[in-house]
Amino acid sequence: MRIVRSVTVVAALAGLALVAGCSGPGGNRSSAGADSAPRKVTGATPGATGTARPGAAPPVDARTTPKSTFALDVDTASYSYARRQLTAGSLPDPSTVRPEEFVNAFRQDYAQPAGSGFSMTTDGAKLPESGTRIMRVGLQTRGEDAASRRDVALTFAIDTSGSMDYDGKLGLVKDALHTLIRQLRPSDRVAIVAYADEPRVLRELTAVSDRNALDEAIDELSASGSTDLGSGVETAYRVARDGYRKGATNRVILLSDGLANQGDTDSKTILDKVSDQAGRGITLLCVGVGGDYGDALMEQLADHGHGMAVYVGDQAEARRTFTTQLTANLTVRARAAKAQVEFDPKRVRSYRLIGFDDRRLAADDFRNDAVDGGWVGPGHSVTALYEVTLRPKASGRVATARVRWQDPESDEAKEAARTVSVSDLDGALADAAPRLRADRAVAAFAEWLRGDRYAPDVRPESLASTADAAADATEDAQLRELATLIRTAAKLKD
């Protein structure tokens, strides 16, 4: 049992460290960037009409609001947590379901670009149930060779409060840390900060070559007391700043169940205290653990703290993350990344972006580099799905999709664009590429789980069959598992 648990959290740690980027409009500057973090802007899409349940995105009139703008997001915690809940026999709380994170959790087959930045893929199909179209905008960064990565300086802020003693959460974390330091290079550095009623620095940043000292610090971890998460994060940033390595990848990695109950418990207040450090090349990465999990706080910490959030699932998820990505992917491919899709109102009546509810930006923010975007690491894909209603007899260009980012080495802003035509969206969904059909099923499943008013009239068995067919075509076991989860959720909802 120890091996299974260890692998699971190591996977999440590697997965977090590897992304080296962040979610949401609150990405930070890396060691190659400026010393002050750009401002963060969030909010609903301007021009949206109608009233929806929380989280649902209503259709937007293309005449009044032709541009859809959002910060990129590479989080996957929402899907991982839902997966754990369903496997344990319960439905996830609708407030924890974020469709874009469900889609991000699955592999894509987008082509990789030659350098930093993104390749772009656009396609779509006609939806049989409504006659509207599904339009997909796929973005992909280039992977990285493990041998060529920078050294890393990882400061772990580890929750050792009493709640971490339940479900073996702290024991799982300790086993994982012991394993992780054996995966790092001797020249990498690791610090260990524990926090409960108050923070304790068990080890300042220490070369991994001194493995015995790090093992001893990990063995000192024990659970008791309350959870002063704010002080723990603040102390970890101080340790990371004191041991900052220029030219290396510097990270604070928070491991917690997100159940703060002492001191500052508001994410913005916590991160305001460390905003200077966060703006100077130290990214916050959040690893959620345990069945009793504070999803909202951990996700908000990631958003406000220039970071990303991943939830620790089970062994299968660990193998997908740990064995395929490991710690090779620690650098940044694109900083402050944003997307904008401009629809042609002569051909498009309305559109609806699925998910990205707290990542949306004003149209003018797209080229305003004072407004930050998502940070994306090597080998990552970001997929945006739109439901598009065309005008009668529409033909020609439907939309132009653009992505803008800052080069991590030069700070230069760059853009790429791709045009979408009616012909790109005219094929039947049943004949579409397997990954597109799977993405549609994943997003519809997420919206069905949270009961969105604007979600389609979902038939779970149809979604499960779509996932099974995509699994057959791609030989992707994760899609097969998705089909099982959909059928499980349907039984739980009956």
Image (cartoon, helix red, strand yellow):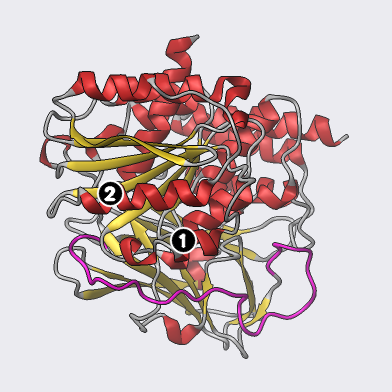
Q: Is residue 226 left or right of residue 408?
A: right
Point out the stretch of residues depicted in magenta: 30-57
Q: Residue at x 59, y 75 (%)?
A: 43
* Label annotation for residue 218: none
- Any magenta on residue 9? no
Quarter of the figure with the C terminus: top right
Identify the secondary structure beneath mark 1: helix
Main SS class of the magenta portion in the image: loop
* Label annotation for residue 271: 1
**Residue 330, placed above or below residue 31:** above
Residue 170 seen in render: yes
| Residue 46 in picture, x, y percent from top left | 61, 83
- Out of 258 and 137, give the one closest to the viewer: 258
Q: Which residue is mark 2?
A: 240
| Residue 275 in picture, x, y percent from top left | 39, 65
Q: Earlier in the sequence, mark 1 or mark 2?
A: 2
Q: Residue at x 15, y 42 (%)?
A: 151
- Crowd rating for badge 2 (residues with CA inside 10 Å; few <14, some 14–19, many 20+): many
Identify the secondary structure beneath mark 2: helix
